[in-house]
Amino acid sequence: MLSNTIFSVDLAQSIGTAGEFRKTVAEIMKEVATPNVADYFPVLKKLDPLGVRRRTAIHFSKILDVFHDLVSRRKKLGENTGSITNNDILDVLISKENREVMEGERIQRLSLDLFLAGIDTTTSTLEWAMAELLRNPRAMSKAKVELEKTIGRGKPVEGSDIAKLPYLQAILKETFRLHPAVPFLLPRKAEIDVELGGYTIPKGAQVLVNVWAIGRDASLWKNAEQFIPERFLDSEIDVKGRNFELTPFGAGRRLCPGYPLALRMLLLMLGSLVNCFDWKLEGGLKAEQMDMDDKFGITLEKAQPVVVVPYSRLHTVG
Ligand code: HEM
């Protein structure tokens, strides 16, 4: 969905073996999240003792080459036909209005940022949402009923359906509360000494905001450890950085710029998976036996992937 939005190309299918692109992105995320001794002792930066910089550079250049190819092909097409017609983000970036700002490698670099920020975050949120629904059959069947009543059994969700699916939206918020994809947001640095809640954060200190812990804080949330989407049905709390008890996309000026796209993609994907298929855990595993441990990197992923078998809902009755 992301590569189609930006380039009108399905990168998951089109480079080398399927999944190679995704694998390279996952490798980059792993390297970026690895504590690197050279970050704390700058004198070691050039030596790159753990090889993080060297390996990351190789991954980056692989992806940048692909983007370079896509950008130059589109530019050539524009020159040949005199018009730009894909109506995607790339069209906007290479349009006359943006030509000066987007010179040189900037389109490729910006696209790399968007892909790195947008792939693992949305994927892991979707996996956690499915895992929670499999463990909470009551929530799963409520979601199915809402989808069936609103758009009809077995149909994929479309953009115009989203506003009519409050329970599905509540499921996503509850997933963000318990499994925020970026559990410490991105590191910040205090520009001046700051007093906060009786503590002094000294100038220059690195600040990590633990949204994972805030989401499970029993003084903020009733039955904090339980998955209860209903808590959001009559609530004003949203995920757009206005309610500090739930800020999976951060808040303020550096709020995630991809959040409208992320919410839309997630609701389309989750709603379609739930409405088009019934799901069973592989190998007869019971939902309560499912491993819900997380694996911490920049993004919070499931330590053990959810392995499920889909059964089409168009062919089942009841
Ligand atoms: C579940 C999905 C996502 C989550 C949970 C998420 C979360 C975040 C968070 C927490 C930040 C840092 C905010 C801060 O430090 O205050 C961030 C930054 C960012 N996100 Fe997302 N994000 C998601 C999806 C996306 C998507 C789909 C895109 C773009 C296609 C995207 C693009 C970005 C970019 C470019 C930044 C850096 C912004 C800056 O530095 O000013 N994100 N995101």
Image (spheres, helix red, strand yellow):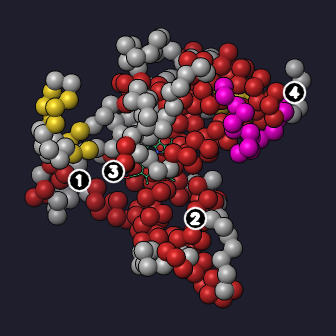
Q: CA distance from mark 3 to mark 2?
A: 26 Å
- Report which quarter residue 245 is drawn in: top left
Q: Which residue is mark 3?
A: 32
**Mark 4 to mark 2 CA distance (whole Å):** 40 Å
Disc assigned to residue 89: 2
Q: Quadrant of the C terminus?
A: top right
Contact between labelled residues 2 and 3, with CB atoms less than 8 Å apart? no
Left or right: 98 in relation to 205:
right
* Residue identifier under label 1: 50
Q: Amino acid at mark 4?
A: Thr
- Dot 4: few (<14), some (14–19), or many (≥20) neighbours within 10 Å? few
Relative image position of residue 314 (x, y in whole percent)? 86, 34
Indicate which disc residue 316 carries. Answer: 4
Q: CA distance from mark 1 to mark 4?
A: 54 Å
Looking at the image, which residue is at 47% across and 57% down? 114
Sequence-first tag of 2 and 1:
1
> Ligand 1 closer than 8 Å to the CB at disc 2?
no
Q: Amino acid at mark 2?
A: Ile
Q: Work out whether residue 291 or residue 5 is closer to the camera in this orientation and state it.
A: 5
**Amino acid at circle 3:** Val
Q: Nearer the viewer, mark 2 or mark 1?
A: 2
Extent of the magenta region: 152-167
Q: Nearer the viewer, residue 187 or 13?
A: 187
Sooner in the amino-acid sequence: mark 4 or mark 2? 2
Circles 2 and 1, Cβ within 8 Å, touching? The answer is no
Q: Is residue 204 magenta?
A: no
